[in-house]
Amino acid sequence: MKILIVRLSAFGDIIHCLPALDDLLARPEVDEVHWLVDERYRFVTEVLPKQVQVHSVALKGKQPLRSAWQVTRTLRHIGFDAVIDLQGLMKSALLSRLCGTPVFGFDKKFLREKPASLLISNVEFHPQERHVVQYYRRIAAGPFSEPARDKPIPYAAPTIDLDNSSINEDESLLARFNLQQNGYVILHSAGGWETKQLPETTWLAIAESLTNRDIVPLFSWGNDQERAQAEYLAGQSNGFALPERLNMSALCTLIRQSRAAVGADTGLLHLTAALGRPTITFWGPSASWRSAPLECSEHDQNHQLHWHIESNPECGPCFSRKCDNFVCMQTIQPESIIRILNDL
């Protein structure tokens, strides 16, 4: 069988899809797996297993319709036995449909853009499947007769095998940045959504606690606005802001050599978890039960790697990018994060 996964974006969501990809690659009847991604997020697919064939579409380019037409024509000629739409939007459903049939996608009740259900075969979720990883695994099982639909598919932690990827770790990175292995904590102050961002005073308190223990608070960033904030916070706390934008290989190196990463529900934190490093995430507008890195077994729970700081606002989780009553992040106290970092 030839299978096409359509997951266009974003960083963290692509990481969440890795267990579904692993499920497909483990099936003996599956010969090829292809992946269609938005050109802006193609860099994330460098962590995929080498046997996955990646295709990209420039939906935000100068000629998005032309790009979509070209890539769907190429993919249609491959002749897929099934297309797996893990995005759940109208644009992904349309692209999936143009690439081949049948198309398997989200449970209709969980689609944000309901008309997309007209273009796909909706895969019904089990009531006990709440995490997005479970959703994606269920959809990926759509073309097959198992697992049974009367039992929930369990959560599986996204994992990355760098030896079977396009990543080439940068052995000179720490020396260039004057960093020591396990001697720094990545503080990702960028929130993606403005409702996911901690107050700067909270970040400064966390950074001060690290410098008091001779641990470098390393502020990461992904765009110019985030860079300005990272440099400001580093300057106010005797910390370190990344001096340049890192490619995926360098970013994986930085994460793998770190002590831990602290941040919101963002791609960098999900990448950190998939690389097996400790994460401390905080939650307000989004829900940890839906998308946080989880411990998978009793062994994992005895060797905890992932902590979730919940604000639990009465109005949340709202899953909103903007808020007129933004209180959830102010209720997260730096001491709750510092306490965990001190115990690592």
Image (cartoon, rainbow, N blue to C red):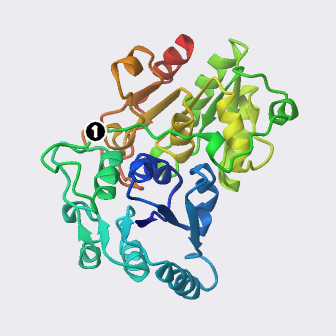
The spot of residue 264 in percent (x, y) is: 49, 40
Which residue occupies the foreground of this view, 38 or 3? 3
Query: Crowding at label 1, few (<14), some or many (≥20) Cα neighbours within 10 Å?
Result: some
Location of mark 1 (residue): 154
- Residue located 50% across and 39% down the image: 159
**Residue 260 placement, left or right of 143:** right
Which residue occupies the foreground of this view, 87 or 236? 87
Q: Which residue lies furthest to the front in this view?
A: 28
Name the element at disc 1. loop
Position above or below: 45 against 207: below
Position above or below: 92 against 14: below
Give the amino acid at mark 1: Pro
The spot of residue 235 in percent (x, y) is: 76, 33
**Residue 296 placement, left or right of 118:** right
- Residue located 62% across and 33% down the image: 187
Which residue occupies the foreground of this view, 218 or 305? 305
